[in-house]
Image: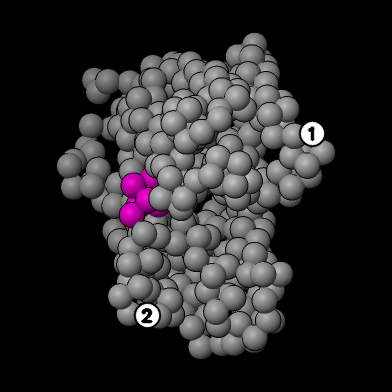
Amino acid sequence: MPPTSPPQDTHGPSLPWLATGFFLAGLGTALLGPLLPFLAASWHMTDARSGTLFLAKFLGAFLGGVTVSRQARNSIFLGTVFCFAGFGCFAFSEGVVSGSLSLLLGGYGLGQMIASTNIYAGKRYRNHTGSALAALNFFWALGAVITGILAGWCVPAYGLRTSLLVFAALFVTVGLGGWFSTARGAPASGVEVPLDQSLSGSTVLLFAALLFLYGGLETCLTSWLPTFTLRFSDAQLLHGESAVVLFWVALTGGRLLASLLLRWFPEHLVASGGVLLSMLFTLALLFTHRASAFSALCILAGLALSPFFPGVWAVLMRRNPSSRLAGSILAVSGLGAALFPWLMGVVSTASESLRIAMLVPIALGFLLAILTLTAKPTGEAPANIVSS
């Protein structure tokens, strides 16, 4: 008999605590960006030293993702504890060294939370996995979208230290709430889901490549759209920020629409078609100068891209990989998020044209559309395996 997944794989926080924790994880993921101008001025940091903060947070998230436990309940709770410690220490940081160490801890917690939550949801919701993941990731995206708004309101009103301490306390509160309100999905008729031993090296590389490229694609767009808008639009669109805000809002709302779409159509086809459409809309940005057209194309690109991650992740989780392997594959997306936006800057500088540099995410998108078609599910999971 093939080995089976341990019961703890579907043993974790109940849905309200899970969604709240993912919302906080979205806030934590995007938090540094809105705070960076204030921190750079207060700590007298150059751009290079400011980048160290992002590097520390990225490294922590990568380490958190590759060290998730088989027991989702433990990893999710551990992630909230590290986020509490990291963001709590960051509130008292007074320079780039202490700030980087604090963000390393906070990033580790975020990596644990994001990876283990996606793994847990993929193992728990065996029916319509892509739909469930899209709905859950809506809360992460919602947190990322409103981070700038909350930071802009809380920091002037209550100060950076108080705001960060309250934020840190919310993590441990949600962690404890999830720990004591644990839900468990049980396989139907007492039959456990066998761990898939057919994950060959090429299959692992395929899914790692998909998430590596997707991490780069999404981060390229969210990092460079404001600058691109300022340079090539006939209006400033609120200093260029509207472009990325519209993209994020569309990506967030699109997760709810994708949840419905993924209930009726194969995940790999929806993901491939969506990213292809998104890149066509992004390509159209290169040929327009009107602010209204920029806004419409950013919205369409975000909507089209929204099914990609939940769709691909659902295909992977249907193969029932071990939690450690799934966490490692997910963590690779952070490497793409670090590499490709930097590559866009290099291309833009070398060619003296950000328009040419936009070909980097466009090329990533078309490559993703092709590769995703090869990531077909090996078979459907038994119906109604897990209760909600």
Q: Amino acid at mark 1?
A: Tyr
Of residues 108 and 191, which is closer to you in this image? 108
SS class of the residue under badge 1?
helix
Position of 158 with respect to 170 (left or right) is: right
x%, y% of residue 380?
Answer: 41, 43
SS class of the residue under badge 2?
loop
Of residues 62 and 43, which is closer to you in this image? 43
- The structure residue drawn at horizontal position 64% and vertical position 65%, both measured from the top left corner, is 241
Image quadrant of residue 350? bottom left
Q: Which residue is mark 1?
A: 158
Task: Determine crowd level at label 2: few under 14, some 14-19, many 20+ residues with C-alpha closer than 10 A.
Answer: few
Quadrant containing the N terminus is top left
Q: Where 377 falls versus 4 (above or below)?
A: below
- The structure residue drawn at horizontal position 34% and vertical position 47%, both measured from the top left corner, is 335
In the image, residue 280 lies in the stretch drawn in magenta: no
In the image, residue 334 lies in the stretch drawn in magenta: yes
